[in-house]
Image (spheres, rainbow, N blue to C red):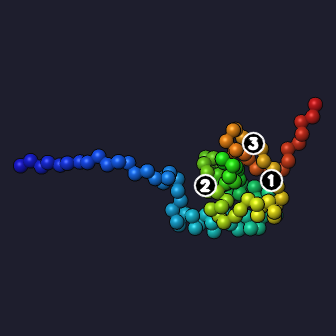
């Protein structure tokens, strides 16, 4: 007795980087943990310090403000995902101190203004 199997080659399904999307439980926990930090922050420095203690960093990636993992530097989420707009944070906390990185509108938010190097 012979069993004939036929396999079809299917076209790949194009998805938007599904491996990095958060599942709904993780997203809810992240929002519940991080949103209060943004709500209570009195300055960009205090926000950066609290996020640092939690293992995160605030950076600009491709012109968008987002949170990254401190250990891996991987993007976790954007601030819009948490329900915040940059203009509202700037209105409340003032303008952030940003150091540009690379050519892709990337940058790091500093907790304090660096001292000028005068010679």
Q: Is residue 45 left or right of residue 62?
A: right
Q: Nearer the viewer, mark 3 or mark 2?
A: 3
Which residue is denoted by mark 3 in the rendering? 100
Q: Is residue 104 left or right of residue 114?
A: left
Q: Is residue 5 left or right of residue 99?
A: left
Marks 1/3: CA distance?
12 Å
Q: How many marks?
A: 3
Most foreground residue, 52 or 26: 26
Which residue is denoted by mark 1 in the rendering? 96
Q: Is residue 115 left or right of residue 46?
A: right
Q: Does 60 appear above or below 83?
A: above
* Residue sitting farthest toward the right: 119
User: If you read the primary sequence from the N terminus, does the residue marked by circle 2 or circle 1 appear first?
Assistant: 2
Name the spot of residue 60 as percent of width and height, x first: 70, 49
Which residue is denoted by mark 2 in the rendering? 76
Most foreground residue, 10 or 3: 10
Image point 77% across, 67% down: which residue?
Answer: 40
């Amino acid at each position: 007795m012979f069993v004939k199997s036929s396999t079809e080659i299917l076209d790949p399904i194009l998805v938007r980087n599904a491996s990095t999307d958060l599942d709904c439980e993780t997203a809810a926990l992240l929002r519940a943990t991080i949103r209060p930090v943004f709500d209570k922050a009195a300055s960009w420095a205090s926000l950066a310090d609290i996020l640092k203690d939690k293992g995160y960093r605030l950076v600009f990636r491709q012109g968008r403000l987002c949170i990254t993992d401190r250990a891996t530097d991987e993007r976790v989420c954007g601030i819009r995902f948490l329900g915040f707009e940059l203009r509202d944070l700037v209105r409340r906390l003032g303008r952030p101190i940003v150091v540009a990185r690379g050519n892709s509108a990337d940058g790091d938010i500093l907790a304090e203004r660096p001292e000028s190097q005068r010679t």
